[in-house]
Amino acid sequence: MTSEERSEMVIPHWSGEVIFGIGICVILVVASLVAILNLFLHIAHTASCVWLAIMAWWVWSNCKGQGNFRKCCITILGLFARKQFVESICQGMGSIEIRFGYQLFGRRMFYFTVPLDKIETVEWRPGQAPRYWNVFVWFDHDDPEKSLRERKWSRKPRQDIYVVGPSRRKQKTEAFGLAFVDFLRCAGAALVRGKDDHTFVRATHRTTEDVERPST
């Protein structure tokens, strides 16, 4: 990929969980506006203050989890964007970035960015509901202290995980997962089949014997 090349792949967006998330956001916003209006009208002061305090704590905790307020806003606004995508773009000197984002009101926003060579595994597995699957990307976080903290409980203490797209039925998730792996390969990722048909790993993490060994 040259410095002028850029490729993009559409990510499925609309699903039951996305529609549910939009509904919850609308309810919370309307309830908060009603609470603010009640304060101006001197109605139900205590209940309104308690609700706004709960909402302030919720916003603060989500912003803390996302890293900052801007990232939190980007995540929330992404619920309302119809066009979700992943793109690969060259940053010069052969460095390629993979960006996950959406387009809203003609502007491109990004949830998450990771260097292509940091991606260690792509896999799809059942989520919280066994009928619905997700595509997961494991990537190197390059934080020794974090690795030590997570060594006892994390399956991959040297990697973080990112969920690509919404939960969907197994067949649809598998089709998207394979297309996503092909997209990363076209961008330059050396991904090979892992322990099963739902796992693809960075080639440098496996021996030639492992790659060529047939599944049983």
Image: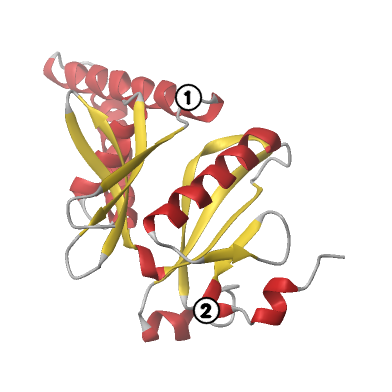
Q: Nearer the viewer, residue 150 or 78?
A: 78
Q: Give residue 205's quadrant in the image.
A: bottom right
Q: Amino acid at mark 1?
A: Trp
Which residue, given by chain and number where applicable, does mark 1 sit on? Answer: 14
Q: Position of residue 193 (x, y in %)?
A: 65, 63
Q: Nearer the viewer, residue 141 or 87?
A: 87
Placement of 203 over or under 135, stated as above or below: below
Q: How far separated are the C-alphas under marks 2 and 1?
A: 36 Å
Query: Mark 2, mark 1: which one is toward the viewer?
Result: 2
Q: Quadrant of the C terminus?
A: bottom right
Residue occupying image coordinates x 34% and y 27%: 83
Residue at disc 2, secondary structure:
helix
Apparent side of residue 77 relative to residue 169 in the rendered image (left or right): left
Q: Position of residue 11 (x, y in %)?
A: 43, 36
Residue occupying image coordinates x 18% and y 46%: 70
Q: Residues within 10 Å of mark 2 (few under 14, many from 20)?
A: few
Residue at the outermost left position? 40
Q: Quadrant of the N terminus?
A: bottom left
Residue at the outermost front position? 2
Residue at disc 1, secondary structure:
loop
Q: Give residue 78's quadrant in the image.
A: top left
Placement of 43 over or under 141, stated as above or below: above
Which residue, given by chain and number where applicable, does mark 2 sit on? Answer: 204
Can residue 50 be seen by looking at this rendering?
A: no
Residue at the outermost right position? 216
Q: Amino acid at mark 2?
A: Thr
Residue occupying image coordinates x 46% and y 86%: 148
Colouring chosen for the image of the structure: secondary structure
Can residue 155 be seen by looking at this rendering?
A: yes
Along the polypeptide, which appears first: circle 2 or circle 1?
1
Placement of 141 over or under 86, stated as above or below: below
Q: Position of residue 91 (x, y in %)?
A: 18, 61
